[in-house]
Amino acid sequence: MAISIADFESAIDAYGPDLDGWPMPVRAHAATLLASSAEARQLLAAAKAVDAALSGPETKAPAGLADRIIGKALGKREPD
């Protein structure tokens, strides 16, 4: 049984870009597809890039930002 590009993309969405975490039957079919399809390799590379970007260091919002956003949403003016 071969895996289609659409099924491969769905598997990336379901299991993530690390093939080691995929169920063995799906992983085996994915490996076969990756060996023969540049499109599959591009999809996997893009998913890995997104995963790496989302796994980056946590950033903190400046102090008071949440209060300023809520104040603006409620129509409050900031002091000059």
Image: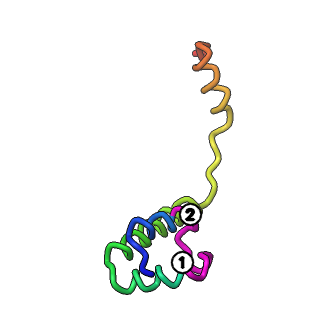
Task: Judge left or right: residue 51 versus residue 79.
Answer: left
Sequence-first disc among 2 and 1 = 2
| Residue 72 marker | none
Tag 2's secondary structure? helix
In this view, which residue lies farthest toward the left?
38
Q: Does 74 appear above or below 36?
A: above
Tag 1's secondary structure? helix
- Residue 24 falls in image quadrant: bottom right
Name the residue located 63 percent from the left edge and 55 percent from the top edge: 58
Q: Please report the bounds of the magenta region as a residue range.
A: 13-26
Task: Judge left or right: residue 47 versus residue 24.
Answer: left
The x, y position of residue 30, in whole percent, is 47, 79
In this view, which residue lies farthest toward the front?
1
Q: Nearer the viewer, residue 3 or 11?
A: 3
Q: Which quarter of the rendering shows the C terminus?
A: top right
Name the residue located 56 percent from the left edge and 59 percent from the top edge: 54
Q: Coloring scheme of the render?
A: rainbow
Q: Nearer the viewer, residue 53 or 28?
A: 28
Name the residue located 42 percent from the left edge and 72 percent from the top edge: 45
Name the magenta segment's main secondary structure: helix
Q: Does 53 appear above or below 68?
A: below
User: Would you name the residue on which mark 2 appears?
Assistant: 14
User: Would you name the residue on which mark 1 appears?
Assistant: 26
Q: Nearer the viewer, residue 30 or 39?
A: 30
Amino acid type, mark 2: Ala
Q: Residues within 10 Å of mark 2 (few under 14, many from 20)?
A: few
Q: Residues within 10 Å of mark 1 (few under 14, many from 20)?
A: some
